[in-house]
Amino acid sequence: MLGDNLPPPNEVVALYQSKEIKKMRLYDPNTTVLEALRGSDIQAAANTSYAADWVRTNVQAYFPAVDIRYIVVSNEVIPGPEAGNVLPAMQNVYNAIKSAGLQDSIKVSTSVASNVIGTSYPPSADSFSSESSSTMTSIVGFLSSTGVPLLLNVYPYFNYIGNTRDIQLEYALFTANFDVLIDGQFKYRNLFDAMVDSVYAAMENVGGRGVPLVASDSGWPSVGGAAATIDNAQTYNSNLVQHVDQGTLRRVGRPLETYVFAMFNENNKAAGIEQNFGLFNPNKQPVYDVSFP
């Protein structure tokens, strides 16, 4: 929560409840927020990278009054110099959760971006990149053994602005009414599904067909950069929340658990689009309206 003008946690929880938003992703173990979440029936996914003491302090002290759903060990660390530390950290946290008898209630995973995928095309041919393959293969194996999803940050916005010559805005916004990408039996009309399915395909290639995905981040900025308008942001997020219950083409009929980024515009982030992914302004007034099913 990188803003110095955001409402206090108890007001944020009340706003979630008023909008009937049932899940929240926290990027740090914020005890003030966890206190505010007590008894709120909002499920939380909190990030951490260490184990037993943290679990006692930030999980056991609040669960089950706070419905903690995931502990996410690192965010977009793979590929990178610390990638090799992710799986051992996941295993340590999982062991701490298991020792507390909470492994059936709280899942331990990690969150990655689409840069874990190589340059293969189309989605069905995708595999993990050479930089991430070894780490991701081991992580997929661990998630398969524990029955836990991989968390994926999915941003069609960045793919679109990085290649406006080949990617149509309608394809990125879920508004294309024609088949844009034909991949064998799969006919894609939106970029989101293609991005998610590329990771499904990569996991299948390393024996992880049974590992689900969670879209742990997805959103569209409303100002500050190319194609960042209120209309586009409202269109994307409105279509996103209506679409994900259908699943993707590789997982038709399997709802994709999805977290919209972000609840608020945050003024301490880098200037430009990074400050403007919020559904709400810090005064709790909506930037635009989105109805959650």
Image (cartoon, rainbow, N blue to C red):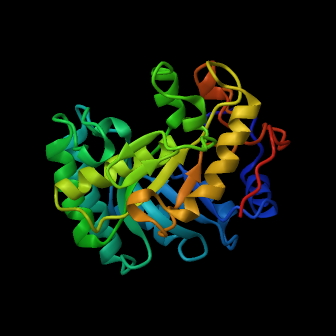
Left or right position of 229 against 128: right
Residue 147 occupies quadrant: bottom left
Residue 116 occupies quadrant: top left
Note whether residue 42 is visible.
Answer: yes
Residue at left offset 82%, top offset 42%: 286
Give above or below for 36 relative to 278: below
Q: Which of the pair 235/187 is nearer the observer?
A: 187
| Whole-percent x, y for residue 235 in the image | 70, 41
| Whole-percent x, y for residue 253 in the image | 49, 69
Give above or below for 67 relative to 217: below
Note whether residue 264 is visible.
Answer: no
Q: Which of the pair 97/80 is nearer the observer?
A: 80
Left or right position of 136 against 215: left
| Whole-percent x, y for residue 36 in the image | 69, 61
Residue at left offset 32%, top offset 38%: 77
Q: Which of the pair 131/80 is nearer the observer?
A: 131
Quadrant in which the C terminus is drawn: bottom right
Left or right position of 222 against 251: right
Give above or below for 281 relative to 94: above
Residue 168 occupies quadrant: top right
Q: Which of the pair 175/204 is nearer the observer?
A: 175
Quadrant in which the N terminus is drawn: top right
Left or right position of 99 against 134: right
Tag count in the figure? 0
| Whole-percent x, y for residue 138 in the image | 17, 54
Residue at left offset 18%, top offset 34%: 131
